[in-house]
Amino acid sequence: MSSHSSSTSSQPAPFDLSAWRNVPTVLMVIGGIGAVAAAILDPKHAAFSYLTAYMFFLSFGLGGLILTILHHLFDAAWSVPIRRINEHLACLLPTLALLFIPILINVLMAGNDNIIYHWIVLLKEGKPDHAVTSKYPLFTVNSFVAAWVICGVVWTVLSRGLRKYSLEQDKTGSIECTRTLRRYAAVGVFLFAITLTLAAIMWMKALQHEWFSTMYGVYYFAGSTWTTLATVYLIVWLLQRQGPLREVVREKTFYFLGSLLFAFTVFYAYVTFFQYFIIWNANMPEETFFFVSREHGVWFWVSMVIIFGHFFGPFLTLLRIDVKLLPWVMIPLASWVWLMHYVDMTFNIMPVMFPEGPHVSWMDFACVAFIGGLLVKLFLKSLNAHPMFPQKDPRFAEAMDIYVPEGKLAQAVGARAAKATSGGKH
Amino acid sequence: MAATPKSYGLIAEFLTPADAMHAAEKVRDAGFRKWDVFTPFPVHGMDQAMGIKNSKVGYIAFAGGVTGYTSGMLMIWWMNAVDYPIMIGGKPMFSPFGAFPPCYELTILLGAFGSLFGMLFLNRLPRLHHPLLKHRRFALASHDRFFIVIETADPKYSETETRKLLESMGSKNIEVVEE
């Protein structure tokens, strides 16, 4: 790949990232070997570690999908230059759907001692309790597989479609592409909500199948979008620094991304608190046990980390208006957001296996390295295979703060895009 | 017209937002402190052009929010757990969870008060009269004209030099505003 050279002198020089080029592959290979070793040595613990890493990384795909959908639904202009990043993140979803297969193997083929979902063990032993039978037909093995198929198909169709017409518009500049994308988004937002809730319930919440919470889907959604916004901020900052987005990303792009991150910090806290508060207030044992078990042992301190690290820290950091534009605050914060989201996923999943407290194991690192390395590799591949930002979007001039009299629009956008186009790799 | 000790400042009229903005940049760069721009609608980028820093009202709002939250918690703790304890549903006499919703409302209420009254305080409002209001052309600031006003109270103000500066920015109509 050619490196981009820009005449802009006020910009700091791009980082030399060539030393990092092989890191995703190395992570993927070492992590993959580690994950397989873990599955042989301790299948149950490995499956829990894998599920934690999986739900963590699923957030990025789903977050990218909803950001793309929201962009089209709101007919937004400011997010046109960064839309391709969201589209590429969403296009990790077909792979993510396939990455669920190890969990399916655990459900379908593991012995009863190693299956991570207790309700499936109950079904296989032929003595489902009331909490399972009352959730028929959703809580059957067939439905579990069907839910995976539905999620995978919906996510693949939506993410591929949303990117396909966006890329087509790069070539044709046709307004019809934008209209098609809006239709995708209008239908997609409902399908997104249903499939995300289905996935969060069947894959994460069903670890404790007796529990129910109507806020669980939106809880996972809030955390996922929060994490994705921090990631998009980081990627946009890096791509601006390295060159490809230098001409098209503005101060307002970072300000809006930072503001959205701030909004989702509050939204996550709101959803999380009220999920807790309603259950606390109703005080019914069939609901409270979920939180009672998570206030047990060291998990209590993990919950404190989530309250102060997931909410108060980022909230107070992002409160000031100018912070959203300071890379030296926002970039470390993005890494902190990843850590907090991973802790959040651990807090949801791991107490089922380790009731006394978190149990950090090399298996966790192996699973994160494997899925993370693979996804980063795929993301970089799609990033380099296509233009870095939509080339002929009708809202592009508006996003660039240029007023163009009607008729001159196409020429102006074309000229601007041609000037800024780059195939640089970061 | 000679400058009198009673003059409030110089008012310069501009016809377009761009003219007013470029003029504002020059006034800012000339180092004036007590001056303002009046436009019929918000002009994006004017804050930067005028060199206005972020408003301090956020700190007052934050202080209001913190006061609301802590006073709410203290009030509920005092009333429910100390002054008149009533056992309800086997719950603790005081819990930050049960007390949270009213405290949250109080956070928002006093935060909003902080931003509203903080804004009024920092703007020195309410104010019954302002010298600009009797200037006959100033009413156009809510119609189609853009004004820059430099006050005589500014240390850099000089009747002749400031007028020259404003003329050099292309203002067609510069007048003295009387106190």
Image (spheres, rainbow, N blue to C red):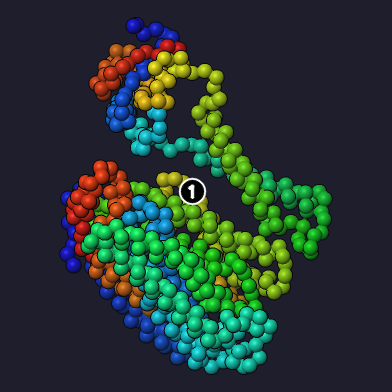
Quarter of the N terminus of chain B within the rendering: top left
Secondary structure type for disc 1: loop
Give the left or right position of residue B166, taking residue A270 as reference: left
Foreground residue among A211 and B96 = A211
The image shows residue A128 at horizontal and vertical percentages of 65, 87
The image shows residue B77 at horizontal and vertical percentages of 74, 51
Give the left or right position of residue B91, taking residue A55 as reference: right
Residue at screen point 56% across, 72% down = A348
Quarter of the C terminus of chain B within the rendering: top left
Q: Is residue B155 visible?
A: no
Q: Is residue A306 visible?
A: yes
Foreground residue among B155 and B115 = B115
The image shows residue A329 at horizontal and vertical percentages of 40, 53
Foreground residue among B73 and A164 = A164
The image shows residue A293 at horizontal and vertical percentages of 64, 74
Give the residue pinned by disc 1: A319
Residue at screen point 63% across, 64% down = A276
Residue at screen point 72% across, 73% down = A285
Q: Dot 1: few (<14), some (14–19), or many (≥20) neighbours within 10 Å?
A: some
- Residue A256 vertical position relative to residue B141 in the rendered view, above or below: below
- Residue A58 vertical position relative to residue B23 in the rendered view, above or below: below
Badge 1 amino acid:
Leu
Give the left or right position of residue A179, taking residue A50 as reference: left
- Residue B52 vertical position relative to residue A406 in the rendered view, above or below: above
Give the left or right position of residue A255, taking residue B98 as reference: left
Residue at screen point 49% across, 54% down = A263
